[in-house]
Amino acid sequence: MFRVVRGSVQTLKDNKFLFEELVKRDFKKKYKRTVLGMFWSVLSPLFMLLVMSLVFTHFFGRNINHFVIYVFCGNVVYSYFNDSTTQGMGSLLDNASIFTKVNVPKYMFLLSKNVTSLINFGLTLIILFIFAAIDGVPFTWKFFLLIYPILCLIIFNLGVGLILSAFYVMFRDMRYLYDIFKTALVYFSAIFYDVSTFDIKIQYLFYLNPIYVYIRYFRKIILYGQIPSLAFHALAAFYALAVLLIGCLIYHRKNYKFLYYV
């Protein structure tokens, strides 16, 4: 595992120029011919937040302090996961015209998509912090600990992207199946409701969902000022590293087959 990662990093350094160009291309392509351009990265989650706040405040938000920020934390994390993995799934097919003609590391296309999604995520985080300040959420040094779930999210999204992009090359139905999965994931990630209303056994089941774990970490720091336990940190890291390992193994085994399916 570590040899693969070390070799991948070295290969990435050797192809630094190509990687930078891919990131620039993906970022420009995403907002090509749009009036507001990159501002859609901020407006899109804001519109979703507005809709959720209007619809769910009267149903779920009566007993939740700072309900708008509560929803925003969930929406920010989920939106990053959604954008990163959805874009990553098509990274190989979208660039088939390149790697079928030139021998380049195929994971670079996925990385470029993830960097673009990470930039959008960073912009949205700034908006989250502004809204939190307006809503009277106290800022403490514990906010710096958000670096941990963000790193876990980056690794987790890369792993999921590796898995999805590999299978999407061979099974084009993957996109439709993944859309169904993401719809279900929204409701099982407790974005707009509090799991404390459920039985304790049901609450533990939510921790089987990695996205809920990362959302929960954000809420603990921002809304409650609590530092998650060591077990919570270990669970977050486990999901990230396990999925990345699976993704790397799939890429390593299926790498030579990609050319036959594009």
Image (tube, helix red, strand yellow):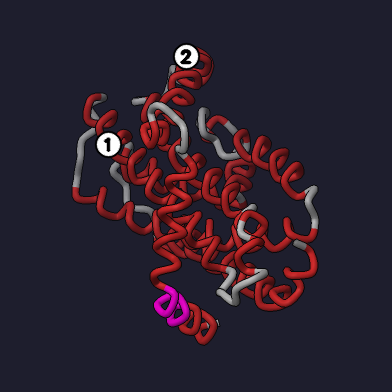
Examine the rendered structure and indicate whether residue 194 appears above or below residue 179.
above
The residue under label 2 is which amino acid type?
Leu
Which residue lies at the image location 43% right of the left edge and 38% below the top edge?
A: 76
Q: Secondary structure at mark 1?
A: helix
The residue under label 1 is which amino acid type?
Phe
Which residue lies at the image location 33% right of the left edge and 56% below the top edge?
A: 147
Residue 116 seen: yes
- Examine the structure image and report whether residue 152 is included in the region drawn in magenta: no
Which residue lies at the image location 51% right of the left edge and 41% below the top edge?
A: 78
Q: Which mark is residue 56?
A: none
Task: Point out the residue furthest to the front here.
Answer: 101
Q: Secondary structure at mark 2?
A: helix
The answer to whether residue 139 is left or right of residue 239 is left
- How packed mark 2 is, by other alpha carbons closer than 10 Å (few <14, some 14-19, many 20 or more), is few
Return the x and y of residue 172 as percentages of the image width and height. 78, 51
The answer to whether residue 196 is left or right of residue 131 is right
- How packed mark 1 is, by other alpha carbons closer than 10 Å (few <14, some 14-19, many 20 or more), is some
According to the picture, the residue beneath numbered tag 1 turns out to be 129
Q: What is the count of numbered marks?
A: 2
Task: Please name whichever residue, 148 or 202, is drawn nearer the observer in this view of the structure.
Answer: 148
Q: Which mark is residue 54?
A: 2
Q: Which residues are magenta?
A: 9-15
